Image (spheres, rainbow, N blue to C red):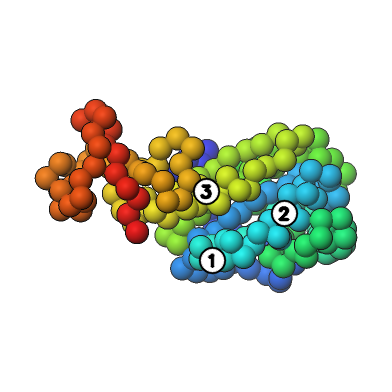
């Protein structure tokens, strides 16, 4: 069964560079960013893992934890981490899942459920669809997911922007417009009546259409 936004993120137990984890217990009451890679020692992924190591404090500041996954043994991840630090200038401190039996990749629909075999003998090309990012809330629900081709490095600044939007809109009855950045105006969601909006936004808002009401971002 395919995964959708607001589905419960499938739980799993796996070996990581930080030891064995139960995924839901590991998330706890925080947000989680699960991002996957088709194989260790791949060039684009090396740059991605290094960048995430560099910006991890930005996620920590937002009460979010990072966890990577690659279709290779944990021992390989540790060796790869040395290359990442050497070439990208940042040490990977977040855990990396070793998905040698493809279990997590299948669970998250990154590989077909009936895919045979293990990590041994597989190439990055055969694991090409293991290039997804999942944003998961403290309620263990999937809030966002996206998949990139192997040749295109992911924009993790966009993941930070999305996380800011999701956290804001989960607290207030607003939505964020196209290309929104923190601090910019937002949209009052249609489910909020004008009467209710007057209580929440006494300074008023700008009505472009009855369904499109622009207001300053709530604090």
| Disc 1/disc 3 C-alpha distance (Å) | 13 Å
Near-viewer residue (2 or 152)? 152
Extreme residue in the front direction? 203
Q: Could you tell me if the residues under marks 1 and 3 are in contact, i.e. CB atoms within 8 Å?
A: no
Extreme residue in the left direction? 195
Picture coordinates of residue 207 (x, y %)? 23, 34
Q: Is residue 213 above or below residue 13?
A: above
| Disc 2/disc 1 C-alpha distance (Å) | 16 Å
Q: Is residue 24 left or right of residue 209?
A: right
Q: Could you tell me if the residues under marks 2 and 3 are in contact, i.e. CB atoms within 8 Å?
A: no
Q: Element under label 1?
A: helix
Mark number displayed over residue 161:
3
**Mark 3 neighbour density, 10 Å: few (under 14) some (14–19) many (20 or more):** some
Mark 1 or mark 3: which comes first in sequence? 1
Q: Residue at x 71, y 60 (%)?
A: 53
Q: Element under label 2?
A: helix
Q: Residue at x 40, y 42 (%)?
A: 176
Q: Is residue 167 above or below residue 121?
A: below
Task: Say if residue 69 shows up in the picture.
Answer: yes
Near-viewer residue (136 or 185)? 185
| Disc 2/disc 3 C-alpha distance (Å) | 15 Å
Task: Say if residue 166 shows up in the picture.
Answer: no
Extreme residue in the top direction? 209
Q: Residue at x 70, y 60 (%)?
A: 54
Picture coordinates of residue 107 (x, y %)? 60, 48
**Mark 2 neighbour density, 10 Å: few (under 14) some (14–19) many (20 or more):** many
List the residue tagged with mark 2: 51
Q: Element under label 3?
A: helix
List the residue tagged with mark 1: 61
């Amino acid at each position: 069964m395919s995964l959708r936004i607001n589905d419960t993120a499938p739980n799993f137990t796996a070996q990581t560079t930080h030891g064995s984890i139960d995924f839901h217990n590991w998330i706890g009451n925080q947000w989680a960013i699960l991002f996957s890679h088709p194989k260790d020692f791949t060039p684009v992924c090396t740059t991605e893992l290094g960048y995430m190591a560099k910006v991890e404090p930005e996620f920590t500041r937002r009460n979010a934890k990072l966890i990577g996954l690659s279709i290779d043994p944990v021992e390989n991840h540790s060796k790869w981490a040395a290359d990442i630090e050497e070439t990208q200038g940042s040490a990977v401190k977040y855990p990396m899942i070793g998905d040698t039996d493809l279990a997590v990749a299948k669970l998250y629909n990154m590989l077909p459920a009936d895919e045979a075999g293990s990590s041994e003998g597989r190439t990055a090309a055969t694991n090409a669809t293991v290039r997804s990012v999942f944003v998961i809330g403290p309620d263990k629900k999937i809030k966002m997911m996206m998949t990139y081709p192997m040749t295109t490095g992911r924009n993790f600044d966009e993941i930070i922007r999305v996380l800011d939007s999701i956290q804001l809109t989960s607290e207030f009855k607003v939505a964020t417009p196209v290309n929104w950045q923190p601090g910019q105006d937002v949209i009052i969601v249609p489910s909020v009546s004008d009467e209710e909006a007057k209580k929440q936004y006494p300074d008023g808002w700008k009505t472009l259409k009855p369904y499109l009401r622009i207001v300053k971002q709530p604090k």
